[in-house]
Amino acid sequence: MEGHAEWFDTSYNTMLAMRAESPAPWNVEPDLTRLIPMDPSCKANFLKIDVNWFKGADTVSILLFLEHTLQDKLDTFTDEDTKKLFELCLVATSSANKFMKTLYNAGFWLSFSERQDLISHGHRLLNAFNSCADLCYWADLTRFKLQPKQHMFGELVFEIEFHHRHKWPTPNPLAYSTQMDEDFVGRICVFSRKVSIRSIHSRTLSRYQIALRALL
């Protein structure tokens, strides 16, 4: 692209230069650096989280923060339409928190009361989300986009309710969810790009085992 040729320069020397040690962005090292996970040998990068994580934990944390913030700020809105929208946001966020809390505190098999709670909180979340989307649509605001994950959540609530109505045992959805840390998934993707499509599964596992063995 004209004027931005350097953005597309992936020659060896350019890529190597990008990995060169950068100067620290301070004259006196701030005390904050002692409290942040980072690579001590390259403090100019400032932040390098060296632990595993998965999105479920992040979702729980940010939802708790949002619920607290919405409760704290709700009375500050003077415009009725704005307040109505954020009241629905609070209902959706609170329901999502209760839904996830129930899942994470339940065992493999959901009890009768746990299923009732999940169905109730799930429907409240879906209804509030749809109401928020509807309000924003008619106000010409692109605040809430109906995305595939919303339908997936609806399928999840439906399955729990279907089992509940038929008095069937219901396994906790967490039992068949994928909760892998992003780093693990990323490494597997890297391995999978280097093998034949016909043997991707066995070769990917083989390469992962080789890499794991090299670390032991």
Image (cartoon, helix red, strand yellow):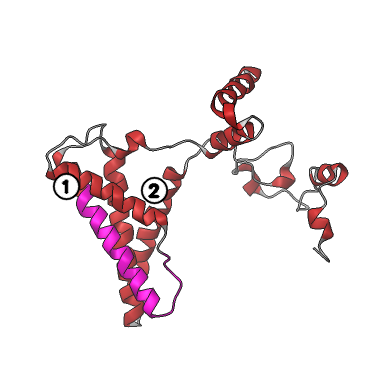
Q: Are marks 1 and 2 in contact (CB under 8 Å)?
A: no
Residue at image coords 18%, 41%: 163
Q: Secondary structure at mark 2?
A: helix
Q: Quadrant of residue 112?
A: top left
Classified by dominant secondary structure, the portion drawn in magenta counts as helix
Residue at image coords 45%, 47%: 58
Residue 196: image location, x then y, percent: 63, 30
Q: Amino acid at mark 1?
A: Gln
Say left or right for 163 vs 133: left
- Res. 116 mark: 1
Quadrant of the frame with the N terminus: bottom right
> In the picture shown, does residue 26 fall above or below 43?
below
66 within the magenta span = no
Magenta segment: 118-145
Numbered disc in front, either 1 or 2: 1
Residue at image coords 39%, 74%: 136
Quadrant of the frame with the C terminus: top right
Residue 186: image location, x then y, percent: 58, 38
Label 2 crowd (10 A; few <14 / some 14-19 / many >=20): some
CA gap between label 1 and label 2 equals: 21 Å
Residue 30: image location, x then y, percent: 68, 50
Return the residue found at the far front: 198
Say left or right for 101 vs 139: left
Q: Amino acid at mark 2?
A: Val
Residue at image coords 12%, 39%: 167
Q: Secondary structure at mark 1?
A: helix
- Res. 45 mark: none
- Residue where numbered disc 2 is placed: 60
Q: Quadrant of residue 74?
A: bottom left
